[in-house]
Amino acid sequence: MKKLLCVLCAILALCACDKQNENPTNKPVVKIGASFPLTGNMAAVGNAGHKALRAAINDANKNQDNKYYYDLMVENDQMDSKTINNIANKFIYTDKVNVIISFFSGAGRIVAPMAAKNQTINFNFSFDDVVLQSKYNFQNFITGPDENAATIEFLKSRSVKNVDLVYENIGAADQLLTPLLANLDAAKIKYTVHRFNKGEVDFRVLVSKLKNSESGAVFIYSYEPELDILTREIRNQNVNKIIAYSDALPMAKDFALYEGFYNIGAFITPEELKTQWGLAGQGASSSAYLYDIGSLIVEAYENTETENNIPTADEVSAQLLSKTDYSGVVGKYTLDSRGQFHSNVVTGIVKDGALQAIK
């Protein structure tokens, strides 16, 4: 019994030590609440974002010169609307966080009006600029217009005069597709649009149409698990055309399936950074942007002059919007007056089982 008590005391002492070391100088605490799909079809992407964000906050807390300590609270939203709403309410009313980080457009659309109403900073990771509803809402990812412009350039550089567009009915599909059609018309590139619903598993007829069409390329907007199923059928039917994706390949689980296919979209995180963040060998499509979101939040709080213990959301928003030029792991950013961080769209190709940027 005495030995057991000694062990328990040692464990408690270690826990107390760890707790003390979390904020050893008792700095004022900035609370950050983030929710990700940590289980389900998008779990790989959600966990990659979570790990990178956690790395950014850990790195910030190692800086003894920082004025604040950053406490990151993470929840699993499973990409479920009701769960996202409940988590956002918890963050705002129970945890009283200073910042919320919302992941993907579905979460962003729920959190953005809540952030505006309650004067809470919200950083969203998605294409969907509907999120930018107030001075409290910010967004860091490539934009739909920038991706569409890169898509047109990609097709023109390969002399594609006719393209098949395959869009799953999810997320920001229509927000991306509608302006893309106008861009294709302006570039005098013919197109045929094919739509399918989430949950479809039989793509034989669709792929047969793609194979026998007059197009020189197929451009796809889809995510797991439909992404793999559709691509596997493209392989099965030997569709001999340029195959490109709207920023889907970094989320793919089996790069070998996509060998020789193109991705137009996000920054491709270097392996050395993924290794640092515990993501070695993974696609980790969101990781660099989430690391930068964490760093941008820290930079804003550290540089905000305030007479309060913690800067207010109004003060932090004003600080962020006072600058237009930022930098991060992704590279150079430009922040516009709506709260959108702009960065370069990258064209990549899967080669030797890895997604590589095309110089």
Image (cartoon, rainbow, N blue to C red):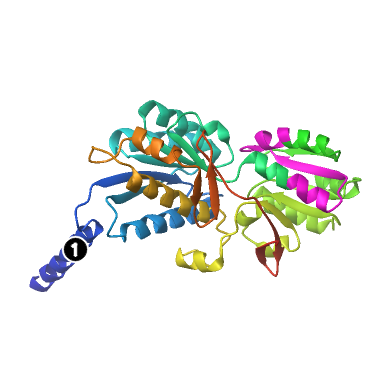
Q: Which residues are magenta?
A: 151-179
Residue 201: % across, % down: 71, 46
Q: Foreground: 309 or 41?
A: 309
Which residue is at 50% across, 65% downward?
273
Please say whether residue 352 is one of the residues in the magenta stretch: no
Residue 309: % across, % down: 22, 41
Q: Which residue is identified by label 1? A: 17
Where 2 falls versus 52 (above or below)? Answer: below
Which residue is at 86% across, 57% downward?
240
Q: Quadrant of the C terminus?
A: bottom right
206 left or right of 339 in image: right
Seen as rendered, the residue at the extreme left is 2
Where 54 falls versus 334 (above or below)? Answer: below
- Report the amino acid beneath label 1: Cys
Residue 245: % across, % down: 71, 50
Q: Foreground: 246 or 300?
A: 300
